[in-house]
Image (cartoon, grey):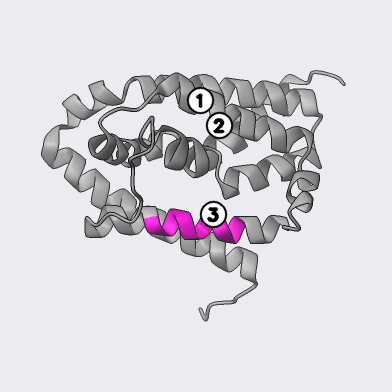
Amino acid sequence: MQINFLDILACFMVLFAIIDMPGSIPIILDIKSKTGNIHPWKATLVSFLIFLAFLIFGEKLLGIFGIDVGSFAIAGAFIIFLIGMEMVLGVEFFKHDSPGGGTIVPIAFPLIAGAGSITTILSLRAEYATINILIALILNMVIIYTVLRLTSRIERLLGPTGLHILKKFFGIILLSIAIRLFINNTGIILPQ
């Protein structure tokens, strides 16, 4: 159990790219407009606990339910696809009437701690020491909390037109990510 700053940096960069918190801002703002409020601390804590559970127990946790990593990723792809469809078409598939609105679902899971990032955690375990991954994860949680905390300021800065454009654009990006996640985990090969 040795701390290695280069490994921490590598894990941090991989997780930062996969979680893509800055890219999730339009999605978070869309969910906030439907639910009225998002609790940054709660979303950060729940997503961190999900990551921690998969970092420590990993595939054994999925194995309890008889689920492999690929199936989990495909399920996450469907949820991401539906969120993207909501953004592009302006329809509502998810009902946000639970206490806390969309803070836990879909923000903490699957937006932050989704199939792609959880699969990444499992992959990183094969290459890096757990302590290095944990430190990189904590650094990412600080960024997640900061972005969630600043959503109101970002919303004011962009204005209604900017939000509408970002929402449609990132909806298409989400659809593409969902399709890629689905294809990568089903073995389907698309013609070039």
Residue 22 appears in the figure:
yes
Q: Residue furthest bottom?
A: 191
Pointer 1 residue: 44
The amino acid on which the numbered mark 1 sits, given as a three-letter code, is: Thr
The amino acid on which the numbered mark 2 sits, given as a three-letter code, is: Ser
Pointer 2 residue: 47
Q: What is the distance, in whole Å, between disc 3 and disc 2 at their CAs?
A: 15 Å
Q: Is residue 39 left or right of residue 44?
A: left
State the residue in front, 55 or 133.
55
Residue depicted at x 27% and y 41%: 30
Residue depicted at x 25% and y 26%: 154
Q: Is residue 169 left or right of residue 2?
A: left
Helix, strand or loop status at disc 1:
helix
Residue 20 appears in the figure:
no
x, y percent for residue 51:
64, 34
* Number of residues whose C-alpha sits closer than 10 Å to that of mark 1, classed few (under 14), some (14–19) or many (20 or more): many
**Magenta stretch contains residue 139:** no
The amino acid on which the numbered mark 3 sits, given as a three-letter code, is: Gly
* Dots 2, 1 in contact, CB < 8 A: yes
